[in-house]
């Protein structure tokens, strides 16, 4: 009888402890209260301009600049997460990019912590145009990364992998950042969304008139990405990381996607293999509304369903991944559809974190 009483008491204690643990308040990161659905989220179509113009409720304290910080609302101590720093293109803004590549819709499912900042404004631009630069913006981005890592340490959250994601000039900026002393020993992977291909870029399609003239809005990003001529490719980075390249079919010239990748060769991957296509029956959230009176296929038209081709360079060394993804019939600015967005997240998460990368695991 005494043994039975002791066992019952122990079971009661364990049950009470489990109940108390289950009732723990979810973690709050960066002073930002998590919401479901995420705050400042666009509707399925016709996202209001005043909503897109928001820059986020998180504040980087050293510069006072705002950014979006999205994460799972039921985040618990001891969890492992993937941290993503996601950068918009030239002439764009954080919340447009947050819906162009809507990682926010999958933060809960795939345990993602996503920082989406907004770049500084080009001096004397009218209307104001946002472009990433290597001065104050680099400091701002480094501070955001330090803040997220500090929060993870304080809240006992384990960052298992860190990815840079960038669209257009944001991709070119990511390509530059990943070579810098601050980022090169932290980043496990880089996803370039129409922002240049590490290991040999395709030729660029004819962007035509694009938005209302060169140097205005996102057209600046296209020009810098090689939209009006060849661009000299930088040397391959010295550090190792996983790499995924995504582009619209119409952004490339008639030769299309290169069948080889110097980066895949550097990472010891096998010959390119085509995987199953990804089919979307639902359109993305956003597009560039400015050039739609004179639209071009290369720049991008209205968002719509579509199919994406996926190419893998398999068996890369140390568990890294290298992929190319082409969205059929799409250009530079149509927002990514839900299934291809999710597939890109899965490809990112399939990579083994780099041994050299700084994590909190």
Image (spheres, helix red, strand yellow):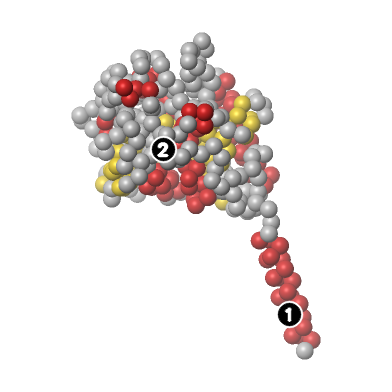
Question: Most extreme residue toward the top, as rendered?
Answer: 124
Give the mark count.
2
**Position of 303 compared to 186: left or right?**
left
Q: Which residue is mark 2?
A: 45
**What label sits on residue 8 in the rendered view?**
1
Residue at horizontal 41%, vertical 37%? Answer: 45
Q: Secondary structure at mark 2?
A: loop
**Position of 359 compared to 20: left or right?**
left
Quadrant of residue 334 in the image? top left
Of residue 154 and residue 298, the one placed in the foreground of this image is 298
Of residue 237 and residue 281, the one placed in the foreground of this image is 281
Residue at horizontal 56%, vertical 47%? Answer: 36
**Position of 359 compared to 338: left or right?**
right
Question: Is residue 176 visible in this depiction of the protein?
Answer: no
Q: Position of residue 101 (x, y in %)?
A: 43, 38
Q: Secondary structure at mark 1?
A: helix
Q: Residues within 10 Å of mark 1 (few under 14, many from 20)?
A: few
Q: Position of residue 62 (x, y in %)?
A: 67, 26
Q: Are marks 1 and 2 in contact (CB under 8 Å)?
A: no
Residue at horizontal 52%, vertical 32%? Answer: 51
Quarter of the picture containing the N terminus is bottom right
Quadrant of residue 15 in the image? bottom right
Q: Is residue 78 above or below residue 344?
A: below
Q: Position of residue 223 (x, y in %)?
A: 35, 19
Quadrant of residue 139 in the image? top right
Question: Is residue 225 visible in this depiction of the protein?
Answer: yes
């Amino acid at each position: 009888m005494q043994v039975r009483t002791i066992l019952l008491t122990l079971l009661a204690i364990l049950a009470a402890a489990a109940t108390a643990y289950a009732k723990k308040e979810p973690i709050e990161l960066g002073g930002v209260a998590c919401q479901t659905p995420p705050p400042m989220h666009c509707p399925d179509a016709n996202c209001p301009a005043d909503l897109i113009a928001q820059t986020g409720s998180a504040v980087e304290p050293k510069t006072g600049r705002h950014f979006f910080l999205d994460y799972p609302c039921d985040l618990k101590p001891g969890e492992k997460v993937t941290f993503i720093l996601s950068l918009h293109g030239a002439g764009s803004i954080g919340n447009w990019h947050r819906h162009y590549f809507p990682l926010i819709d999958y933060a809960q499912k795939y345990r993602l912590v996503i920082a989406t900042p907004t770049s500084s404004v080009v001096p004397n631009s009218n209307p104001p145009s946002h472009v990433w630069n290597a001065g104050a913006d680099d400091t701002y981005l480094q501070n955001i990364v330090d803040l997220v890592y500090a929060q993870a340490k304080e809240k006992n959250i384990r960052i298992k992998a860190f990815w840079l994601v960038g669209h257009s000039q944001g991709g070119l900026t990511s390509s530059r950042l990943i070579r810098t002393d601050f980022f090169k020993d932290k980043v496990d992977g880089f996803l370039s969304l129409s922002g240049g291909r590490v290991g040999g870029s395709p030729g660029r399609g004819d962007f035509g008139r694009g938005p209302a003239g060169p140097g205005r809005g996102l057209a600046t990003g296209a020009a810098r990405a090689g939209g009006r001529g060849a661009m000299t490719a930088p040397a391959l980075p010295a550090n190792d990381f996983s790499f995924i390249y995504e582009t619209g079919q119409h952004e490339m010239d008639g030769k299309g996607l290169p069948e080889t990748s110097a980066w895949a060769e550097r990472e010891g991957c096998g010959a390119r293999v085509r995987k199953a296509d990804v089919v979307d029956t639902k359109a993305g959230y956003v597009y560039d509304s400015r050039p739609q009176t004179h639209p071009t296929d290369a720049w991008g038209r209205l968002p719509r369903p579509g199919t994406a081709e996926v190419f893998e360079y398999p068996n890369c060394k140390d568990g890294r991944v290298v992929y190319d993804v082409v969205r059929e019939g799409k250009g530079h600015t149509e927002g990514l559809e839900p299934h291809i967005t999710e597939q890109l997240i899965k490809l990112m998460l399939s990579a083994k974190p780099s041994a050299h990368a700084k994590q909190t695991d």
